[in-house]
Image: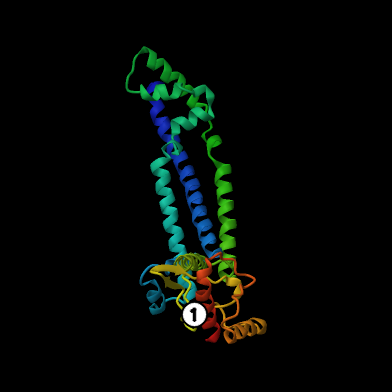
Amino acid sequence: MVRDYMLVVPLLDKFKSYLTWSYRTLGFFQTAGKFVFLFLLMILFNIYELAYYIPGMEKLSTSQTCLGIYWFNLGLMASGALLLTLLISLVYRLFGKGNRFNLINLLETSFPDLRTRLSTAYDNSQNINIVTKKLLEDVHVQLSGIRIRSIVPKKQIFRSCLVFLLVSGLATFCIYEGFSFNISPGKLIDDFWDNLHNMNARAAYEDDEKVVPDSRYKIEAVIIKNGEQVEMKINPTLGLGFTSQIDADTEQKFNASSDSFNENFRYSQTYSENLPEEYEPLIKQYFEDLSSR
């Protein structure tokens, strides 16, 4: 007769075989749910446009004759959703070791009486002595009284299956109705680059902007008096040198000034420079030359 303590490991293997099938079913529905959810998002937001940034993709879409453009774009989105699902699953397997199916942890969590006892008995199943023999016999008795179906993740499987069916139904509706949001990633990217280009162009224009003198008024703004350069400035409010529009009153004053050269020099009401008196003939000549053109 086989000793009870020798039946612990075979009983655990039997439990594992039964529960592994259940957890694989759960994993299938969870993975399928992720796929259809990503696929639905791609349909709603027209993510297929991103694929056309890949060189040669547009040529391939027009040259292939097996599918129409609409179904070809759906195939692109399905491929993208599948690739993302596999990538997420790979990351989960690499960095989610603590979340993998572990029969010992599952049994100890579901049945507090087995906590630490089951893992200790399993680790020492090959090291039989008086202590471990007694421990294995007690654990076997407890395992034999377990209804393994009670820890099958039925609710999780049902919930995952329901989510998968609902999202699949929404994706199917969007496919056959051609429904999607009025959001285009390609348009968003193009708008972003256009705005960035406009900002750069505006900044470059403001940095490089220079005042170009009006070619109609070729009057030097610097004169030489007794070997010294004197910069002549016109107050912008006069409207001279900046525009060709001269009001009648200003024109009459300059005409009168040109007819009476020997009259006293008159300052403009808006001219506020304080220059020595010996510069007055030069200033007068400057304005006379300006008004005669």
Q: How is the image coloured?
A: rainbow
Q: Which quadrant holds the N terminus? A: top left
Q: Does 136 sit above or below residue 100?
A: above
Q: Amino acid at mark 1?
A: Asp
In x, y percent, where is residue 265? 59, 75
Residue farthest toward the front in the current orientation of the protein: 262
Question: As rendered, which of 226 and 251 lies closer to the eye?
Answer: 226
Residue on which disc 1 sits: 214
Q: Quadrant of residue 222?
A: bottom left
Residue 139 visible in the snapshot: yes
Question: As rendered, which of 111 and 146 lies closer to the eye?
Answer: 111
In x, y percent, where is residue 174? 58, 66
Q: Quadrant of residue 267?
A: bottom right
Residue farthest toward the top in the current orientation of the protein: 130
Tell me the residue at 54%/79% (across/down). Answer: 287
Tell me the residue at 53%/30% (across/down). Answer: 110
In x, y percent, where is residue 212? 47, 75
Question: As rendered, which of 212 and 246 lies closer to the eye?
Answer: 246
**Secondary element at image label 1:** loop
Q: Does 271 sit above or below residue 124?
A: below
Tell me the residue at 60%/82% (across/down). Answer: 257
Left/right placement of residue 205 relative to residue 257 reads left
Tell me the residue at 38%/79% (across/down). Answer: 63
Left/right placement of residue 41 relative to residue 14 reads right
Q: How many marks?
A: 1
Residue 75 visible in the snapshot: no
Q: Bin the neighbour count of mark 1 within 10 Å (Cα to Cα): few under 14, some 14-19, many 20 and up.
A: few
Question: As rendered, which of 40 and 111 lies closer to the eye?
Answer: 40
Left/right placement of residue 227 relative to residue 68 reads left
